C-alpha cells in the first residue's frame, strides 16, 4: 500500500484527486499510476485503470490473475468492471467510498456472483492515511 500512497501524493502535488494504485506480482511492483483525469482531460483516467493497462502491456498478457492491485480508494464502477475483465486476483484498497465504491460500499461489482470472475477484496488497509489525503485535497479546494 505504500507504493499506492506514494502515487496518491504525486497526484495531489500535480492537482489531481489523490488516488494512487500499484500492481504487484508477488513482492515485485509491476506498474504504478495515479489519477490523471485533469492532465489527460479524460474523466476515465483513474489510477486503477492506468496501472492495470501498464501492467498488462509490460507483462504481455490479457489477465492479471496472479496479481494484486493496491489502491488508496475503493474502486468505482468503471474501475471495478475493468478489474473483473482483467481478471485481477486481488484488490486491496484504503478508503471506503460510500458515494461511488463498487467493492462493497455502494455495490459490489468485484464480487458479483453473476460475473465470470470474482476478485478477492481486502478493504480498509491504510484507511486513515488514504482518507486524510483526500480530505486535505478537497478541503484546500473549498
Image: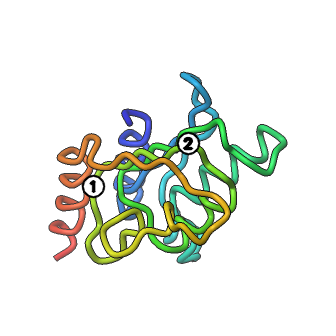
Mark 1 Cα shell of 10 Å, populated few (<14), some (14-19), many (≥20): many
55 and 139: which is toward the camera: 55
Question: Could you tell me which residue is drawn at 61 percent across and 49 percent down?
Answer: 88
Q: Is residue 63 above or below residue 78?
A: above
Q: CA distance from mark 2 to mark 1?
A: 18 Å
Mark 2 Cα shell of 10 Å, populated few (<14), some (14-19), many (≥20): many
Q: Is residue 3 left or right of residue 18?
A: right
Question: Outermost residue, right direction?
Answer: 60
Q: Please state the horizontal and vertical placement of residue 123, each as a whole percent of the image.
A: 32, 49
- The quarter of the rendered structure image containing the N terminus is top left
Task: Answer whether labels 2 and 1 touch (C-beta < 8 Å).
Answer: no
Q: Please state the horizontal and vertical placement of residue 23, each as a whole percent of the image.
A: 57, 40
Q: Please state the horizontal and vertical placement of residue 33, each as a whole percent of the image.
A: 54, 48
Residue that label 1 marks: 95
Q: Nearer the viewer, mark 2 or mark 1?
A: 1
| Sooner in the amino-acid sequence: mark 2 or mark 1 | 2
Question: Could you tell me which residue is drawn at 52 percent across and 64 percent down?
Answer: 46
Q: Secondary structure at mark 1?
A: strand
Q: Please state the horizontal and vertical placement of residue 112, each as a whole percent of the image.
A: 51, 67
Residue that label 2 marks: 32
Q: Secondary structure at mark 2?
A: strand
Question: Could you tell me which residue is drawn at 43 percent across and 35 percent down?
Answer: 3
Amino acid at each position: 500500500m505504500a507504493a499506492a500512497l506514494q502515487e496518491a501524493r504525486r497526484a495531489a502535488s500535480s492537482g489531481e484527486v489523490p488516488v494512487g494504485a500499484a500492481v504487484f506480482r508477488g513482492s515485485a511492483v509491476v506498474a504504478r499510476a495515479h489519477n490523471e483525469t485533469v492532465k489527460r482531460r479524460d474523466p476515465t483516467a483513474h489510477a486503477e485503470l492506468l496501472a492495470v493497462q501498464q501492467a498488462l502491456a509490460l507483462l504481455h498478457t490479457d489477465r492479471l490473475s496472479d496479481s494484486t492491485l493496491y489502491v488508496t480508494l475503493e474502486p468505482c464502477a468503471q474501475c471495478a468492471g475493468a478489474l473483473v475483465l482483467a481478471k485481477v486476483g486481488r484488490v486491496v484498497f484504503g478508503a471506503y467510498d460510500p458515494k461511488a465504491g463498487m467493492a462493497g460500499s455502494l455495490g459490489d461489482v468485484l464480487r458479483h456472483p453473476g460475473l465470470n470472475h470474482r476478485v478477492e477484496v481486502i478493504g480498509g488497509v491504510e484507511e486513515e492515511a488514504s482518507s486524510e489525503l483526500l480530505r486535505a485535497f478537497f478541503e484546500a479546494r473549498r
